[in-house]
Image: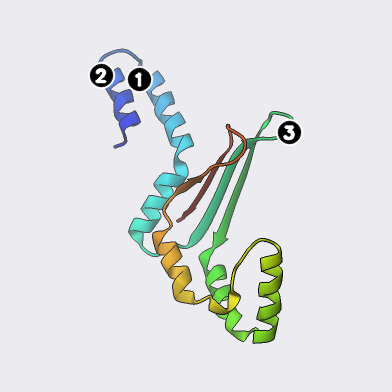
């Protein structure tokens, strides 16, 4: 049980909030943290199946906006395996263009086991962005 949920239950036990208020507070906590619970449950059950990227921020009008991308890891695994079929000369050109774009990535060195190592070590992380009220989360589930 997380600390915030315990605090709400303690307030309920002490009579500081009603059962309805406690229920609303707990529901609000669950809305703020659904991806953490689902990613931990999925990872404890077995191999991760999706890479998830979630962005919560205000748009240019000050309205809340949300991006929620769920990429099947099988697609990423297949893409890594397909790099073996690309001719070395084409990979060299792709690497040159990636470097020009500011992404120094060597596609000739990309291996499936590297992707698996990344997935195994990718816990939920928060990425800092320029907007103070924006939040970016990247995790596997």
Give above or below for 2 relative to 121.
Answer: above
Q: The residue tagged with tag 1: helix, strand or loop?
A: helix
Q: Residue at coordinates 58% horizontally, 36% vertically from top-left?
A: 134
| Image quadrant containing the C terminus | bottom left
Q: Position of residue 40 (x, y in %)?
A: 38, 51
Give above or below for 20 relative to 95.
Answer: above
Foreground mark, 2 or 1, reads 2
Q: CA distance from mark 2 to mark 1?
A: 9 Å
Determine which of the numbered discs, if any, sits on residue 60 in the image.
Answer: 3
Would you call the spot at circle 3 few (<14 residues within 10 Å), some (14-19), or many (20 or more)?
few
Q: The residue tagged with tag 2: helix, strand or loop?
A: helix
Q: CA distance from mark 3 to mark 2?
A: 43 Å
- Residue, disc 2: 13
Q: Quadrant of residue 65?
A: top right
Foreground mark, 3 or 1, reads 3
Q: Residue at coordinates 53% horizontally, 75% vertically from top-left?
A: 110
Specify whether 133 is left or right of 25: right
Give above or below for 93 relative to 27.
Answer: below
Q: Position of residue 90 (x, y in %)?
A: 70, 82
Q: Residue at coordinates 70% horizontally, 35% vertically from top-left?
A: 59
Q: Earlier in the sequence, mark 3 or mark 2?
A: 2
- Residue, disc 1: 19
| Residue at the top extreme of this rendering | 16
Give above or below for 128 relative to 108.
Answer: above
Are discs 3 and 2 less than 8 Å apart at CB? no
Q: Position of residue 62 (x, y in %)?
A: 69, 28
Q: Position of residue 12 (x, y in %)?
A: 30, 19
Would you call the spot at circle 2 few (<14 residues within 10 Å), some (14-19), or many (20 or more)?
few
């Amino acid at each position: 049980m997380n600390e915030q949920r315990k605090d709400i239950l303690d307030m309920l036990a002490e009579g500081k909030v009603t059962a309805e208020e406690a229920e609303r507070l707990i529901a609000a906590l669950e809305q703020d943290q659904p991806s953490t619970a689902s990613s931990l449950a999925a990872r404890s059950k077995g191999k991760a199946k999706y890479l998830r990227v979630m962005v919560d921020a205000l748009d240019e009008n000050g309205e809340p906006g949300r991006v929620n991308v769920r990429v099947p890891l099988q697609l990423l695994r297949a893409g890594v395996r397909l790099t073996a079929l690309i001719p070395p000369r084409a990979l060299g050109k792709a690497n040159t263009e990636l470097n020009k774009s500011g992404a120094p990535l060597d596609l000739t060195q990309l291996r499936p086991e590297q992707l698996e190592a990344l997935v195994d070590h990718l816990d939920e992380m928060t990425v800092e962005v320029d907007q103070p009220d924006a939040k970016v989360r990247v995790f596997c589930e």
